[in-house]
Amino acid sequence: MLTTEQAKYLLDLPKKVVEGNEVLNTLTITQMFPFEVRYELVSDRDDEFIFLWVVKQSAKHTIRVSLHVQENGSKIGLLRIDFNGGGHKILR
């Protein structure tokens, strides 16, 4: 489990996409529907961590962007953004 300070540190690290053996300075995504892409990210400030960035558009046309730190074979969620997610119902 991450502390708030550890999560903030990991979120604040500058990250770049890795494709094959190349670290990219820029990335252009061409979106088609349905869409799902996964990228591995690294930081030149702290090479101890590897990140997974997932961008997905579901059949409901919602877009989800997730960022995970991959540590010891597990994925720890750092950030998730849902666009046009439709919301959740609150049961009372």
Image (cartoon, rainbow, N blue to C red):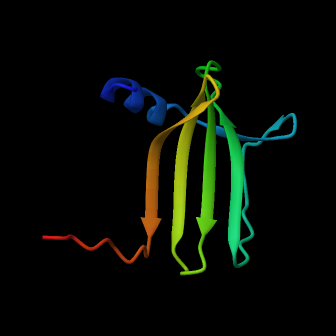
- Is 20 left or right of 16, judged from the image as shown? right
Q: Point out residue 59 in the picture as x, y percentages from the top left corner.
A: 60, 80
As displayed, is residue 18 above or below residue 57? Answer: above
Q: Position of residue 24 (x, y in %)?
A: 76, 42
The tally of labels here is 0
> From the image, which quarter does the C terminus lie in?
bottom left
Q: In the shown orientation, is residue 8 left or right of residue 20?
A: left
Which residue appears farthest toward the right when viewing the image? 21
Locate the N terminus by quadrant. top left
Q: Position of residue 57 (x, y in %)?
A: 60, 71
Foreground of the two, 28 or 33: 33
Up-down relation of residue 34 to residue 24 (above or below): below
Residue at 51 percent of width and 75 percent of height: 62
44 or 41, which is in the foreground?
41
Position of residue 35 measured from the top left corner of the image (x, y, whole percent)? 69, 70
Q: Is residue 10 above or below residue 53?
A: above
Q: Nearer the viewer, residue 91 or 22?
A: 91
Asked where in the image residue 33 lies, by quadrant, the reply is bottom right
Question: As drawn, is 26 to the left or to the right of 45?
Answer: right
- Residue name at image x 87 percent, y 34 percent: 21
Q: Is residue 86 above or below residue 6?
A: below
Nearer to me, 41 or 82:
82
What residue lies at 73% left-to-right and 60% top-to-bottom? 28
Looking at the image, which residue sits at the far left? 92
